Amino acid sequence: MLESWGRYPKSKPSKVHNFWWLTDGLPHTNYPLLPHGQGRSYGDVCLNSGGTLVSTRLLNRFINFNKDTGVLRCEAGTTVADILKFSVPLGWFIPVTPGTKFVSIGGAIANDVHGKNHHIEGTIGRHILQFELLRSSGERLICSPSSNVELFKATIGGLGLTGLITWADIALRPVKGPYIQEESIKFQNLSEFFEISRSTDSKVEYTVAWLDCVASGANLGRGIFMRGDHSQRPAKRGDYYRESKLSVPFDLPNWALNNLSVSAFNFLYFNKQQTKVLNHTTHYEPFFYPLDAVRGWNKIYGKQGFLQFQCVVPFGNGSGEKAIQEILKAIVADGSASFLAVLKEFGDIPSPGMLSFPRAGITLCLDFAFRGERTMKLFKNLHSIVFANGGAIYPAKDACMTPEEFRMSFPAISDFTQHIDPAFSSEFWRRVGGGSL
Ligand SMILES: Cc1cc2nc3c(=O)[nH]c(=O)nc-3n(C[C@H](O)[C@H](O)[C@H](O)COP(=O)(O)OP(=O)(O)OC[C@H]3O[C@@H](n4cnc5c(N)ncnc54)[C@H](O)[C@@H]3O)c2cc1C
């Protein structure tokens, strides 16, 4: 069964169709269709109960690379990991990367993913020069900022609903080697986070903070701020790519991740850095992909799976900061713990994507084991804080926003719906009332 990363909700497509070659056509039965990349979305954007998932796992070849300009043409199922393995030894890096390298380029475009450099580079959609879109009519359209422009904008962040991206041209960026010059700074509370974030030179390319979301009272919002730039240091003895050697072989029982174990992890993680500031050179793998070090880490939440909450709230003269504080207080009051809690300020660089999620403001991201009604109640509460402050929820991580919340998150929805392929749909789209928008 193809699952999403959060393993919630459970879903069964009636068919999985492997798309092998660029010249393949789309199936004509078992509608609706939905493209499926690596299933690294958490909720249900990559699920299609009762319909056909068109998997791009085998559509993963490089087509062309210009080593002078760094423009790579690859099939849509090619992963960020495939690209880095090939491009870093040649002095090129992906311009925007999410927190895992196991995502396909098609999936990254369809969610218009963002990374630690959003304030400088915006989303991946800004670095996609063109792609081919296969529609259920059999048409193959080249979409770019100058050709089929509206379809280009609808497909970036288009949640797989406008057709199947078969290949894409992506502009890589030059690097001297695989290392990052990183500085980690411990902060004791949210105000200190905002001070560091705002005083960080806007030229520092990558910024993000880990939060100890179990800490309360005077320590509410304490954490570690990480910032870094590509280092000028060349690779030592072919140290371009690191494979993860650890994996979680089976589902852990439900009780394994509880408040106690998460609190202990958070305490140790916060205190492992002895000094306030730590400077060091690190490989890009632990810097961008710490979670990829353990394959199948989603099994630690057990069979019932987990939900991720990711919101953005606009700065709004300090109201954004207050909203983040309110959200953290609600989590502490609920007694729910998350070992993964990430805080970052997004920049205001616009994306070409109509339904792109990132926008100027503060984004907060947390994982919670799925515990039925209790988790749904917590999410309802967190969503109400987000929407009372003019914020939005990220579809790539979502399994429970309401149709109304979806419309509030994406004001361009009525422009977008005109570009949907009539044979395409998803579990997410049906849940947020897509058919009636
Ligand atoms: C550990 C972890 C960290 C993450 N960190 C971040 C982060 O920092 N920033 C961020 O933005 N996201 C992040 N994500 C989310 C992830 O980057 C996105 O969900 C991404 O879209 C997943 O890509 P995928 O190949 O797995 O696509 P899937 O999850 O399989 O599909 C995602 C969407 O893309 C569509 N799609 C897939 N292939 C195609 C195609 N060829 N043509 C058209 N549509 C297609 C699907 O229909 C679906 O709607 C993270 C996920 C994990 C597991």
Image: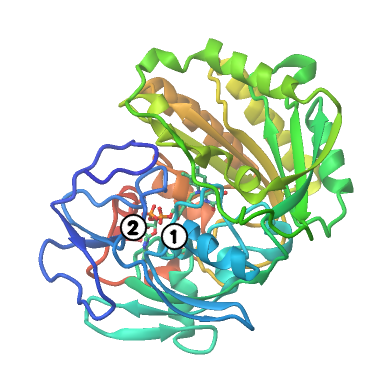
Q: Residue at x 67, y 17 (%)?
A: 267
Picture quadrant of ligand 1: bottom left
Is 317 or 88 nearer to us in this picture?
88
* Residue positioned most to the left: 29
- Which of the two discs, 2 and 1, labels the residue nearer the N terminus? 1
The answer for how far apart the CA atoms under marks 2 and 1 are is 29 Å
Task: Give the residue at mark 1.
Answer: 79
Mark 2 or mark 1, whichever is nearer to me? 1
Q: Residue at x 37, y 64 (%)?
A: 77
Q: Is residue 390 visible?
A: no
Label 2, residues with CA under 10 Å away: few <14, some 14-19, many ≥20: some
Task: Give the residue at mark 2.
Answer: 434
Direction from residue 316 to residue 22 in the image, left or right: left
Q: CB of residue at label 1: within 8 Å of ligand 1? A: yes
**What colouring does the structure picture have?**
rainbow
Q: Is residue 372 above or below residue 79?
A: above
Q: Is residue 32 visible?
A: yes
Q: In which quadrant of the rendered view does residue 220 lie?
A: top right
Q: Amino acid at mark 2?
A: Gly
Label 1 sits on a secondary structure element that is: loop
Q: Amino acid at mark 1?
A: Thr
Q: Is residue 169 above or below residue 309?
A: below
